[in-house]
Image (spheres, grey):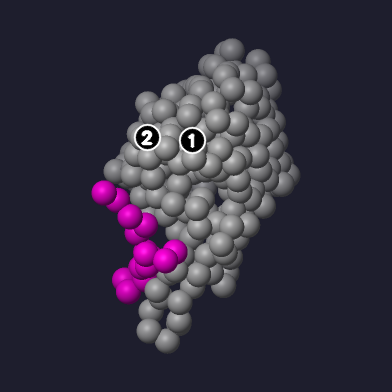
Amino acid sequence: MHRFLLPVRDKMTATGKFQTSPGKGVFQLPNSDQELMTMVTAILDGNVAKVAQMLSASPGLASACFQSGASRATEKPYFLGQIGRYIYRGDTALHIAAAAYHARIVELLIEAGAGVHAANRFGYNPLHAAAAGNPGSLRWNPARQADTIRILIKAGADPNSTDKRGVTPIHIAVRTRCSLAVKTLLECGADPARRNKNGSDAMVLAVNTTGRGGSGSPEAKAEQRRILELLNQPETTSHV
């Protein structure tokens, strides 16, 4: 069974506290977040039965959001090593399930009332979370990622939704070099010509180096070539 992957000497205790390195004391989650963190553990474990049990006992968990999250002062306790993502204030269980590409759990949460439009403090919704990936890593699964994207959009998620920086899900999929996610978003109505607040559209992000860790790997470069092919197809360029 997986657990939160924290730096050496940093671990979560049975009471919901994070024991940090010597001299740093103990970090404790706010009471309002502890049950939600237990749900996150079940999601990362892929424990569908546990998630269903928790939703049955506490239906409000489907729409509950974290009241605390990663910041410059408290990054480590909120890092989820299994999916390479931090928990941020405003994240819901659906954000985490989407980022983990657990399609069945995503369905369970939506059926229980989870909001596909819920946004964290950066304006990221669950579809933004599902669009991110890391080609070549053990945690990346393009097929599961695409399935998760389709489920969210079928449930009402907007493929052209923007965060506070004007970033759409396709911007994230392109920037993190996930070609099947890009293809799926295009098929579901994502607009590749939409620009973020820096003025970049999907093609600009596809052509230029992202500066993101892993974007220079052979797997990421192969994904980049596929993304450029997708964006250069006639039916795609007609959007521009």
The three-letter code of the residue at mark 2 reads Val
State the image quarter where residue 234 is shown.
top right
- Residue 68 or residue 169, whichever sits in front: 68
Name the spot of residue 104 as percent of width and height, x first. Answer: 41, 28
Identity of the residue drawn at 37% across and 67% down: 13
Is residue 192 among what the camera can see? Answer: no
**Magenta-drawn stretch contains 100:** no
Above or below for 123 versus 14: above
Q: Is residue 107 visible?
A: yes
Which structural element holds mark 2?
A: helix
Q: Amino acid at mark 1?
A: Ser
Magenta region, residue range = 1-16
Image quarter of residue 138: top left
According to the image, label 1 marks what residue? 56
Q: Residue furthest bottom?
A: 23
Question: Measured along the vertical axis of the image, is residue 58 above or below residue 192?
Answer: below
* Sequence-wise first label, 2 or 1: 2
Q: Is 120 situated above or below 114?
A: below
Q: Is residue 12 magenta?
A: yes
What residue is disc 2 on? 48
